[in-house]
Image (spheres, helix red, strand yellow):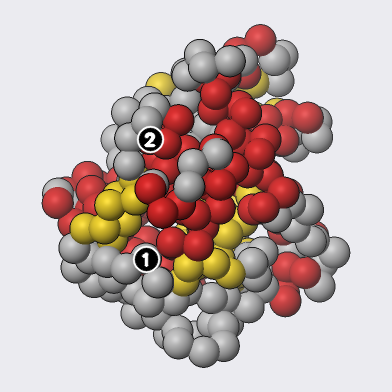
Amino acid sequence: MKRIMVTGGLGFIGSYFVRMALERGYRVVNVDKMTYAARTDLDFDSHPHYEFIRADIAELKHLPVGMDYIVNFAAESHVDNSILANHDFFHSNVRGVYNLLELVRAKDETDRPVFVQISTDEVYGTIHEGSFREGDRLCPSNPYSASKAAADQLVLGWKQTYGLRVMIIRSCNNYGFGQYPEKLLAKTIEYLLLGRKMTIHGDGSYRREWLYAEDNCEAILTLLERGREGEIYNVSSNEEHSVLEAAEMAAQAVGVDPKDAFVFIPNRPGQDLRYSVDCSKVRALGWRPQRTLADYLPEYVAMYRRKLGLD
């Protein structure tokens, strides 16, 4: 039975991964410092193959014994927050990754886990046509994506210099129940259910790819089981919508006329116009996304209604 240390396993994507890994028979040690975005609706503690350690990855002094993998989801991720106050992003996304890499390096070479860095498509920056491939240059546009790009470079540097066994996985925009309502779809659904209007930066025309969090975690497990160490993998649904289109789909699922749902505010600095990544490498291993945004939104809204006590 393989053992995985998951960092940030009480966060949005990390919590999906922890549940899926436990269901697949892995032993999971979850290291999470329980920030404002940590989920409180999880029942992992009752599982016999689950262990929780409350800790900050940037301050962690040692790794749990006998880990086969470290899968690092722990990160500050909200772009607006990174623009307003970027210190926490450097602390978690850069210093935290540095500390984890050093803890792995300190172990005997025969006992080092594979370090899997969960990155983002945002490290590539804008692409007007086509899709970025894993070997393309990084051109981050804001403090969040810059901190993630820096972490990727640390991982590659520690691989090359110290021989660490690593993998980098760059995923597109994730959605799903449990996402903290500062992100677009969660915030849109919560605001509209509560009778408030949602704010949209600029004209909402910038385009993103949208991936259900469970599909993303399925891809990550596929890569742990079938991917090659030392490689970078993009993960995407290739389902592309503008921010406004995705918010309008959410409004329709809530039952609110999109014409009455939004307030447009000034664009954020460093706004990327379009993200798109080629994920043929992970698809060649047999992975395919199973959900679409249109398919999932009615279920998402129903769960949010129950969460808010509106049913």
Query: Looking at this view, is 194 or 53 the one in front?
Result: 194
Q: Assess disc 2: are there few (<14), some (14-19) or many (≥20) residues with their C-alpha within 10 Å of its C-alpha.
A: some
Residue 45 position by quadrant: top right
Q: Residue furthest right?
A: 286
Vertical position of residue 43 compared to residue 236: above or below: above
Q: Amino acid at mark 2?
A: Tyr
Q: Looking at the picture, how far across and down is residue 288, in whole percent? A: 79, 61
Residue at x-position 57% and y-position 59%: 210
Query: Looking at this view, is 4 or 177 the one in front?
Result: 177
Query: Looking at this view, is 264 or 221 the one in front?
Result: 264
Q: Going by the image, does 160 lie left or right of 212? A: left
Residue at x-position 85% and y-position 64%: 286
Residue at x-position 44% and y-position 62%: 243
Which of the labelled discs sits on residue 151, or is there none?
none
Q: Going by the image, does 59 lie left or right of 211? A: left
Q: Looking at the picture, how far across and down is residue 113, in whole percent? A: 60, 47
Q: Amino acid at mark 1?
A: Gly
Q: Quadrant of the C terminus?
A: top right
Q: Are marks 2 and 1 in contact (CB under 8 Å)?
A: no
Instruction: Work out whether residue 295 can be spotted.
Output: yes
Which residue is denoted by mark 2 in the rendering? 191
SS label for mark 1: loop
Vertical position of residue 117 compared to residue 145: above or below: above
Tally of numbered tags: 2
Vertical position of residue 149 compared to residue 44: above or below: below
Which residue is denoted by mark 1 in the rendering? 204
SS label for mark 2: helix
Q: Quadrant of the N terminus?
A: top right
Instruction: Work out whether residue 14 can be spotted.
Output: no
Vertical position of residue 164 compared to residue 261: above or below: below
